[in-house]
Each structure stands twice: as C-alpha cells, then as structure tokens.
Amino acid sequence: MKKDFIFAGFGGQGMLLIGKFLAMACMLDGKHVSWLPSYGPEMRGGTANCSVIVSDNEVGSPMVDKADAIVAMNLPSLLKFEDRVKPGGVLVVNSSIIDRKVERDDITVVYCD
C-alpha cells in the first residue's frame, strides 16, 4: 500500500499542520511516511503546501507527482494542483472561498464550506 497526499492553501490555514498530523498518525500506526513542506518567506498569507506519502514499505523519494488525494484551500492552490490528482483520486475544495467548479470527471470532488 502506498498513498500520496497534497495539502495546499494560504499560510495560516493549517495545511502544513494537517499534513504533519497525518504523517505522525500513520507513523504511530507502523507505516513508513514522508512529510515535505513547501512555503514562502511570509509569516501568514503566502502560499503553503506539503506532500505526505504513507506506505507499507520505505519511501524512496518525498516528491509527489500525482496524488491520491489533494486538499485545496484557496484558488491558487486549486489551479496549481487540480491536474495532479490521480484518476480515481479525491480532490477536496474549500468552497467557502473558491467559487470555481472542477471540470474533471475522472476524480471525486468534495466541496466543503
């Protein structure tokens, strides 16, 4: 089993924290994990994202090209990562600030307020 995740949004929305929580929970469950944060120099409001890999085997690289699930909390994140959801994957969209609808029909899209 290997699952790849991307969490993306503005700094301060908790995307790095939720990724770290997922990685730590899976590690405590005996899985091999990787957590790779990416953020700008801003303290709050800049872009922030992280990738998490959860696997039964050792993780060879922390890079995620295509993800099984992506959470996009703002429009820039949706535009950047929408195409990186694997066919059959899940895209969670923060519809309280994103009014754009996803046009892909090969993934499950969940809109959350």
Image (tube, helix red, strand yellow):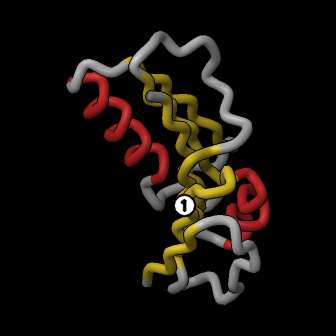
Lateral position of residue 37 relative to residue 57, left or right: right
> How far across and down, in percent of the image, does residue 68 sit?
56, 47
Residue labelled with disc 1: 90
Q: Nearer the viewer, residue 46 or 62?
A: 62
Residue located at (30% from left, 30% from top): 26
* Quadrant containing the C terminus in the rendered view: bottom left
> How far across and down, in percent of the image, does residue 25 sit?
26, 33
> How far across and down, in percent of the image, does residue 44 sit?
55, 56
Number of numbered discs overlaid on the protein picture: 1
Q: Establish if 104 lies above or below 22.
A: below
Which SS class for mark 1? strand
Lateral position of residue 69 relative to residue 54, left or right: right
Amino acid on which the number 1 mark rests in the picture: Val
Residue located at (21% from left, 24% from top): 28
Q: Establish if 1 lies above or below 5.
A: above
* Quadrant containing the N terminus in the rendered view: top left
Q: Residues within 10 Å of mark 1 (few under 14, many from 20)?
A: some
Q: Nearer the viewer, residue 97 or 1?
A: 1
> How far across and down, in percent of the image, does residue 93 sit?
55, 72
Residue located at (39% from left, 36% from top): 20
Q: Establish if 32 lies above or below 79.
A: above
Residue located at (48% from left, 57% from top): 12
Lateral position of residue 37 relative to residue 84, left or right: left
In this view, the residue farthest toward the bottom is 99
